[in-house]
Image (cartoon, rainbow, N blue to C red):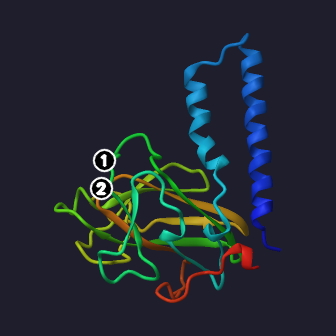
Amino acid sequence: MFVTQSKLTMVAGSVFAVFVFLLVVLFTMNDGEVDASTTETMSMFLPSILHIGPPETCYVGEGGRVVAEIEDHVPPELWRFETTEPGYYDLGYLIWRGFPEHLNPPVAPLYYHMEITNPGEYRLLIRSFIDGEDITENNDVFVSVDGGPWVKTYTSNPFSWSWHTCQIDHNCTQPRYFLSYGPHFIGFAARSPGMGLDRFALVLTGLDGDIDGPTSPVCSER
């Protein structure tokens, strides 16, 4: 059974209600005061809880893979939709044209929802290119899965479209996540100016999924 957009919205509403309830409890327990560190910690999760994207940003995994176009998301803030760099798939790509954002993610996050039908360990691949003079300064974004920590994720392939995706500096480690059956979400947040994103893929470990072919069906079509 697939989760529709309306069900995702209901889930988000329920989670937000729990968030408000916990905040009220903390307020009461502390004689009307909640310390700044507590509210800061809780507010870190609030954007992820509240953000339920439009139907075109929810995808159904098939055959152990999820493939999606980054530009399906309406670009917020200084993410720009462009078609300047040839070789992109579909309509174009999104590129960060703002300032370096190396601290305090997420800035201008892009969230995409998924329905996983084959649980297991998935590899994350991002099709990207670098539009900048320094491949070590214009080559990364922050990534978070299911509201987890925002992790610097980068490419070392200079100035051309590539699926090369790494985490951990100086020791390229491909991002991997265990995804259970059901709904999940992934976020991409600004880090380096000139980092262009075309599409992303999550592929079940051990599969050579076709990530250059058609994208996954959107949830509203199922």
Q: Which mark is residue 180?
A: none
Chain-order first, disc 2 or disc 1: 1
Image quadrant of residue 167? bottom left
- Amino acid type assigned to the residue bearing label 2 in the image: Pro
- Residue 99's label in the rendered image is 1
Which of the 4 quarters of the picture holds residue 168?
Answer: bottom left
Location of mark 2 (residue): 193
SS type, badge 2: loop
At a point 61% along the width and 81% down the height, the residue shown is 216
Q: Are marks 2 and 1 in contact (CB under 8 Å)?
A: yes
Q: Is residue 116 above or below residue 40?
A: below
Q: Position of residue 102 (x, y in %)?
A: 34, 45
Q: Amino acid at mark 1?
A: Phe
Q: Quadrant of the C terminus?
A: bottom right
Q: In which quadrant of the rendered image does the N terminus lie?
A: bottom right
Residue drawn where x is 43% and y is 82% of the image: 89
Q: Picture quarter containing residue 174?
A: bottom left
Q: Residue at x 63, y 70 (%)?
A: 56
Count of numbered marks: 2
The residue nearer to you, when weighing 118 against 80, is 80
